[in-house]
Image: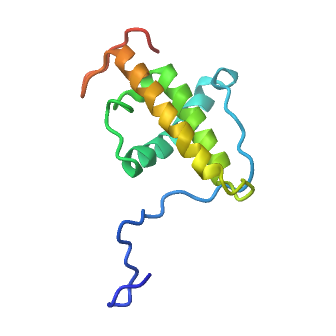
Amino acid sequence: MTSTSGGTDRGVLPKVVNSQPIGPPQPIMWSAYTCEEQRHLLESLDAWVRWLVDHYRLDRRYVPECWTKHWELIEELSALQLAWEAAYATTSHGDAPLAWHERFALARTRLAEWVARTGCRAGEHRRAGSG
């Protein structure tokens, strides 16, 4: 799609921030990694979560600013990223993105429940029941 000025008219299309997954992704068992390895993996997950929050306009009821301090949220978001990578991999089945969106709807319910249990509010992290 091009605009009359010869440039690309992005309209409502998202900006390019992800790369196409090339094959089946590998699940992350967080407890199998050292603290340093976990930090590296968390940085990668954080980039994807920032994209997810922006792309789907999620608010803090689903992903609070302090999500990286709550293992239950890290595990849920990590699993969601894994499912997303599998759904959009070049080797995936044609209806895989639709199945991902169905799983995403269920995950939003779980995320909201996890966030409610943390007791965290905008700009205020609470440690209760989390890591």
Residue drawn at point x = 62 percent, y = 41 percent: 83
Task: Examine the image and state in which quarter residue 69 appears.
Answer: top left
State the residue in front, 102 or 33: 102
How many numbered badges does the structure rendering display? Answer: 0
Residue drawn at point x = 60 percent, y = 33 percent: 79
State the residue in front, 29 or 60: 60
Residue 56: x, y in percent? 40, 48
Residue drawn at point x = 34 percent, y = 32 percent: 65
| Horizontal arrangement in the rendering, residue 18 relative to residue 115 (left or right) | right
Q: Please identify the residue farthest to the top as the structure is shown.
A: 128
Residue 28: x, y in percent? 67, 32
Q: Is residue 102 visible?
A: yes
Relative to 95, does residue 37 appear above or below in the rendering? above
Give the position of the N terminus as an image quadrant: bottom left
Residue 34: x, y in percent? 65, 24
Relative to 59, does residue 32 appear above or below in the rendering? above
State the residue in front, 6 or 36: 6
Task: Examine the image and state in which quarter residue 20 appears.
Answer: bottom right
Render colour scheme:
rainbow
Relative to 3, does residue 31 appear above or below in the rendering? above
Residue drawn at point x = 34 percent, y = 46 percent: 57
Q: Is residue 40 visible?
A: no
